Amino acid sequence: MNRTQLAEHLGISKGRVSQILNDGEINFSIEKIVQLSLLLNKYPQFELIEKEDYIKEQEGPGSKTITIDYLNTEF
């Protein structure tokens, strides 16, 4: 499937597909994530966990390092 076909399938612009694939920019609303997931025959699952538990899990043995800029943001 090329980018034009993917854009048509997902209901987003070809430019947006390129932005996601090239830049990794995936700033979607939760509603859009659900819509896109269902178009891909997937069911999204969201989970809220304690920030400290998440950080400990990411720092554990064999874990992959994930950088999320807003992890240290207080709301």
Image (cartoon, rainbow, N blue to C red):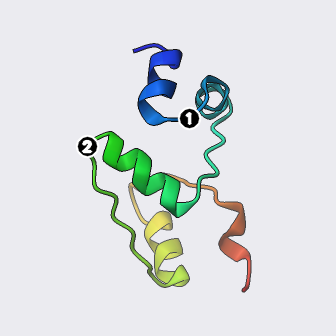
Is 40 left or right of 33, judged from the image as shown? Answer: left
34 or 68, nearer to the observer: 34
Is 22 left or right of 64, judged from the image as shown? Answer: right
The residue at 45%/35% (across/down) is 10
The residue at 44%/79% (across/down) is 48
Residue that mark 1 sits on: 12
Return the x and y of residue 28 as percentages of the image width and height.
59, 53
Q: Is residue 59 above or below residue 53?
A: above
| Residue 44, picture quadrant | bottom left
Return the x and y of residue 13 as percentages of the image width and height.
61, 29
Q: Is residue 53 above or below residue 17?
A: below
Task: Determine which of the numbered discs, if any, sits on residue 38 in the image.
Answer: none
Name the amino acid type tagged 1: Ile
Return the x and y of residue 65 as percentages of the image width and height.
54, 53
- Quote the CA–CA distance across marks 2 and 1: 17 Å
Name the amino acid type tagged 2: Asn
Q: Residues within 10 Å of mark 1 (few under 14, many from 20)?
A: few
